[in-house]
Amino acid sequence: MTDEHGGAESKPGQWVVVVLAWAAVGIPLLWGVWMTLRKAAVLFK
Amino acid sequence: MAGLLSRERTIAGPGFNRWLVPPAALAIHLSIGMAYGFSVFWLPLSKAIGITKPVPCPADQSLLDTLFATNCDWKISTLGWMFTLFFVFLGSSAALFGAWLEREGPRKAGVVAAFCWGGGFMISALGVYLHQIWLMWLGSGLIGGIGLGLGYISPVSTLIKWFPDRRGMATGMAIMGFGGGAMIGSPLADLLMKHFATPDSVGVWQTFVTMGAIYFVAMLLGAFGYRVPAEGWRPVGWTPPPPKQATMITSHNVHVYEAWRTPQFWLLWAVLCLNVSAGIGVIGMASPMIQEFFGGRLIGAAGLSLKDLTEAQKGQLATLGAAFAALISVFNILGRIGWASLSDRLGRKQTYFVFFSLGTVLYALVPFAGRIGSVALFVTLFCVILTMYGGGFATIPAYLADIFGTKYVGAIHGRLLTAWSAAGILGPVLVNYIREFQLDHGVPAAQAYNVTMYLLAGLLVIGWFCNLAVRPVADRHYMREDEPAPVRAAAGATRPA
């Protein structure tokens, strides 16, 4: 990731932080969606 | 501490990765989104005294006595007032504090939201422990409701500034979190209540304390993750489209105090209100609606209406009703990210044309699905309808940024959310009262929603015309380049000559 204003590349290792940040919110969200879909599955039985 | 929260301290340095901002926004929206899932507490709370079954209050008990009674259980209808408080205070606090947020920055707003939402849970825990309903209304309803409003609008303008090339997608990601919060919170609350339940307690106050602490930490992390871009920053390789080629996307800014004086604000208010009214009306009634539409057909007993079913069969139907409500909630969040991202390609006005045109057709088709007895068509119609309900929420911040500019979009969005509060009353009232009116006049339960569906389709037709009338803001409403914003803010609502 670069930005025009600062003209600098994204700091090394920042993508690791990005992945961790997304995992921190994404995993609970996916768990919630999974639990909801399990509940909804009754509709298709 | 104050310095740590100031807008100046949140300006990102060179090389900051903008993809760190959406997870910060999601941490806040996923936390406050639990507002939708509060009904998971109603049943245990309705027997907080009796533990195994509710202890009814005297029939002639006054409201004042209900507020302070410690010897009988709360009714679910009394607890349900929490939802009204949530959405009234969400809309009003977003409208009231939007300008403050733009001035002070998203981090301070996020931290205040964390204290309100997490603190509200703690006060509610005390309310459950002491069995004082007024403490619950004050804690989660009023204080928590203010946290909802501040938390909801806190990332909007920041995300739009970081993603000028994908405004819809950026705000869609955050607002998707608000739709998904209950999906995490409800099963988590269920697990916690089971864990904390004892022969003497239904485990709710302990669950409130635990969840309040979790949400407080998550929201603080989100707030401290917020960064605003430096003035003039833009993504590499992206240049703003020339104004002549994109007349619906302005490069100017309208001040929050000026925005609400424009017809565009009120047209977009109506657009949001009408789109949400239609959706919110069916969300609240999804479970009973599918049961009343199809009766025994849902469980392989075609021809039997609800009143002909045994208690066991009614239990099966209720399970299916809950499954239907769960399924459409997934489509609600898919619509938030899907439609908002698509709006970056289609354009905001065109996206709303799709919502209103397709929505009108789909609502009008619902009675047909009931008439031919097609459960699959019925479910499909509502799944698509719910994507557009969620999509409407997620696309509106980008629509506002296109029309009014990005400088005050968070505050303008906050004021526009009063449309949500209005829709929260209009939608359920339309669906519930028309249904009851139909039933009272002898209409079979399976057909009691037909008029409602045509009426909701009619609301969307009005919305279509409101959207059609949205035009770029007249030049006189734009801020001058050299206009000092704080002077205008301090001056209140007047525009300097």
Image (cartoon, coloured by chain):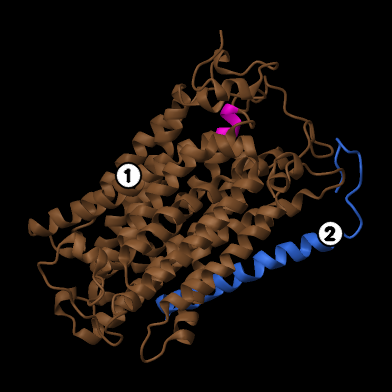
Residue at position x 21%, y 84% in the image: B311
Residue B168, numbered label: none
SS majority, magenta: helix
B488 relative to B40 in the view: left or right: right
Q: Quadrant of residue B460?
A: top left
- Crowd around label 2: few <14 · some 14–19 · many ≥20 (10 Å): some
Residue at position x 55%, y 71% in the image: A32
Magenta span covers which residues? B400-404
Disc 2 marks which residue? A15
Chain rendered blue: A
Chain rendered brown: B
Q: Is residue B195 above or below residue B44?
A: below
Closer to us: mark 2 or mark 1? 2
Report in which chain the residue with disc 1 lies: B
| Residue B305 in view in this figure | no
Spot occupied by residue B166 in the image (x, y as percentages of width and height): 68, 42
Q: Is residue B401 magenta?
A: yes
Disc 1 marks which residue? B457
The amino acid marked with disc number 2 is: Trp
Q: CA distance from mark 2 to mark 1?
A: 46 Å
Spot occupied by residue B262 in the image (x, y as percentages of width and height): 47, 22
Q: Quadrant of residue B372?
A: bottom left
Q: How many marks?
A: 2
Residue at position x 50%, y 52% in the image: B147
Q: Residue furthest left?
A: B441
